Amino acid sequence: MDLRLDGLTVFVSGANGGIGRALAAAFAGEGARLALHAHSGYRALSEWIAGQSWRDRASALPADATKPDEMDDVFERATARYGRVDVVVANAGIWPAEELRIDQQPEERLRRTIEVNLLGSLWTARSFFKTLARTGPRPDGRGAALIFVGSTAGRFGEKGHVDYAVGKAGLAGLVRTLKNEIVALDPYGRVNMVEPGWTATEMARPTLEVPGAVARALRTTPIRQLSLPEDIARMVVFLASPAARNVSGEIVAVDGGMEGRVQWEGDEIDEERVRARLKAD
């Protein structure tokens, strides 16, 4: 299938992570031009781009996604180089690995995770809308596309990671609002989100390597396998393309059919206590 992404400019935030690099490679394979954002990983991203066959169609752009002025500036630089930005993937995010209840989480962690995962995506979208307001829609009718990278934690919650779950859950509000706003700037503009489940990225790998972690992660998943970054990238590329020209406001899970998180292992459930409580009630 020709996804008709050839010649379009794609902006990816958080492009130095596992999913970010997979996104860059997938869009490059479709012939797109790439404006790839990073913050702390900017140098590593620049070196990685230099080793790619499509390096002449890509640039690394440093900015702190939590700073709206910096995101405005990075979009201006992307537009100055490529003329316009057609597709944006708001992918930048963090996941503090330590499991802590809400009362145990320090204020700094709560604020930082939500600031990066939710507000960073909001500022990215805001800067894109500003850019689209200046450049206008494409004359060929290939509408603008904004795709957020969420998480199943935003749908099911995640014990010990309330900061992450709240930040990702908030993205659903952005999708459902911005799908109605983008059409004022581009009548064929679309906004969607991809929700990865457990994905074998460098960020998640230390947790997944703990004995028993993979089995626990997959206990509610019909397809008993972890996602790869490429699985997420392929769905994002499809939603970004004119092949999905009439798809907007959708949240698509790439999670093997996950139904939720396991709360208790079998030996943690006292069946006699449960039965006794039924009789008491």
Image (spheres, helix red, strand yellow):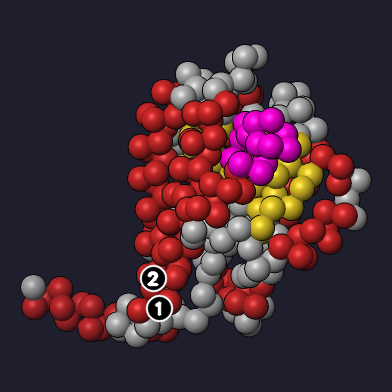
Give neighbour class at mark 1: few <14, some 14-19, many 20+ (Cα, 10 Å). Answer: few
In the displayed structure image, the side of residue 121 where residue 140 appears, left or right? right
Residue 157: % across, % down: 38, 63
- From the viewer's perspective, is residue 144 above or below residue 265? above
User: Could you tell me how many numbered marks the image carries?
Assistant: 2
Q: Name the residue: 61% across, 48% down.
A: 74
Question: Which of 61 and 234 lies nearest the eye of the viewer?
Answer: 61
Residue type at mark 2?
A: Arg
Q: Quadrant of the C terminus?
A: bottom left
In the displayed structure image, the side of residue 97 where residue 82 appears, left or right? right
**Label 1 belongs to which residue?**
108
State yes or no: discs 2 and 1 in contact (Cβ < 8 Å): yes
Residue 48: % across, % down: 83, 59
Give neighbour class at mark 2: few <14, some 14-19, many 20+ (Cα, 10 Å). Answer: few
Q: Which residues are magenta?
A: 76-88
Q: Name the residue: 37% across, 83% down.
A: 106
Provide the secondary structure element on which disc 1 rests. Answer: helix
Residue 112 picture quarter:
bottom left
Residue 227: % across, % down: 65, 56
Question: Which of 139 and 174 lies nearest the eye of the viewer?
Answer: 139
Q: Quadrant of the N terminus?
A: top right
- From the viewer's perspective, is residue 242 above or below residue 33? above
- On whether residue 77 falls in the magenta region, the answer is yes
Q: Name the residue: 46% across, 24% down.
A: 185
Whether residue 139 appears in this view of the structure is yes
Provide the secondary structure element on which disc 2 rests. Answer: helix
Q: CA distance from mark 2 to mark 1?
A: 5 Å
Residue type at mark 1?
A: Glu
Residue 162: % across, % down: 38, 70
**Label 2 belongs to which residue?**
111
Q: Name the residue: 35% across, 45% down.
A: 173
- On whether residue 71 falls in the magenta region, the answer is no
